[in-house]
Image (tube, helix red, strand yellow):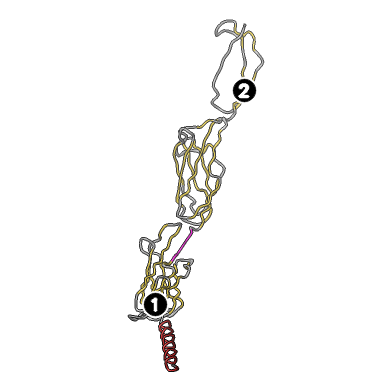
Amino acid sequence: AGQFHWSYPGSVIGMDTIVGRVLDAPGGNVIISSSSVTKHWTEVPRHVTLTPATASNPVGTSHGVTLTYTIDGSPAANAPVRIEITSGPHSGLEAVGFTTGAGQFHWSYPGSVIGMDTIVGRVLDAPGGNVIISSSSVTKHWTEAPRQVTVTPSHTSNVVDTSHTITLIYTVGGSPVANAPVRIEVIEGPHAGVFNQGSTNAQGQFQLTYTGTEIGTDTILGTVLDVPVIDSSPVTKRWVEVIPVGWPTFPINGVAIMAPWIALGAAVILGAGLLVLRRRRVCR
């Protein structure tokens, strides 16, 4: 068919000019040459992405990003890569490594400061070498962790001259916070001004125990003194009279409450009944 075929690999971007020649003998003189043709070598399509594009979490948790690298649409394995935080409260943190068989590299880091991080993934020509291609930047918003302070029990009753214990529990992001400055105080009622101040234990707890000396209802508040200060919902403690032996009682919230007026009322009714009986006898 009077044809000759030749293939060669392209290793450098650019344009080749190619000419075909007919010789009078192998390695001999040129008899005739073809017109020149050209071959343009372009960059292999490379693509690097970083996901997720944006995310928001409270500080004290971790955030993970995944770099995916493909060449001509196929995963590129064992490629040296770097993920770095280019701006934000955690700027300067980075991770280096190699892509997996799926062309991916994953990195997680903990957030300790409120703010927004900007993160970029890069593919290198060698470990620690020059950047070949970079991803679009992604962002991570770090928000204040949910803080919660509770005081228990919420509502109880006891007789005076007994003691009552209140427990404060402080958590951030659902986890107990140790060594936090706290205060429990009776803010209203017959024992207003009674308080205890200190630091939470490893379980995020702190207690106040006090003895009720007066009848009435106390309102109690727990406060975490970190900045910003946070208060619990108020709870109440009802102090009732001591019950002498033999006095009638009735229950309120599971506590026997003295009812001298019941006894007095019963005595009045009984006395009135006896008086009526006596008068009837006199009339007869």
Q: Quickly name the residue at label 2.
A: 39
Outermost residue toward the right?
35
Q: Is residue 74 left or right of residue 32?
A: left
Residue 21: quarter of image: top right
**Does the stretch in magenta take in 186?**
no
Give the dominant element type of the magenta stretch: helix, strand or loop.
Answer: strand
- Quadrant for the N terminus in the image: top right
| Numbered range of the magenta stretch | 146-150
**Does the stretch in magenta take in 149?**
yes
Residue 279 is situated, as x and y percent measured from the top left of the image, at 44, 92
Q: Earlier in the sequence, mark 2 or mark 1?
A: 2
Q: Observer-nearest residue: 236 or 186?
A: 236
Q: Is residue 97 above or below residue 225?
A: above
**How would you rate the neighbour count of disc 2 (Cα within 10 Å): few for under 14, some for 14-19, many for 20 or more?**
few
Q: Nearer the viewer, mark 2 or mark 1?
A: 1
Residue in the picture at 61% in, 18% down: 18
Residue in the picture at 48% in, 56% down: 113
Q: Is residue 239 left or right of residue 22?
A: left
Q: Observer-nearest residue: 107 or 40?
A: 107
Residue 186: quarter of image: bottom left
Q: Is residue 233 left or right of residue 35?
A: left
Q: Is residue 5 above or below residue 199?
A: above
Residue 217 is situated, as x and y percent measured from the top left of the image, at 44, 77
Amino acid under disc 1: Thr
Q: Observer-nearest residue: 269 or 104?
A: 269
Q: What number is the disc on residue 249?
A: 1
Q: Is residue 226 left or right of residue 209?
A: right
Distance from label 2 to label 1 (Cα)? 106 Å
**How would you rate the neighbour count of disc 1 (Cα within 10 Å): few for under 14, some for 14-19, many for 20 or more?**
some
Amino acid under disc 2: Lys
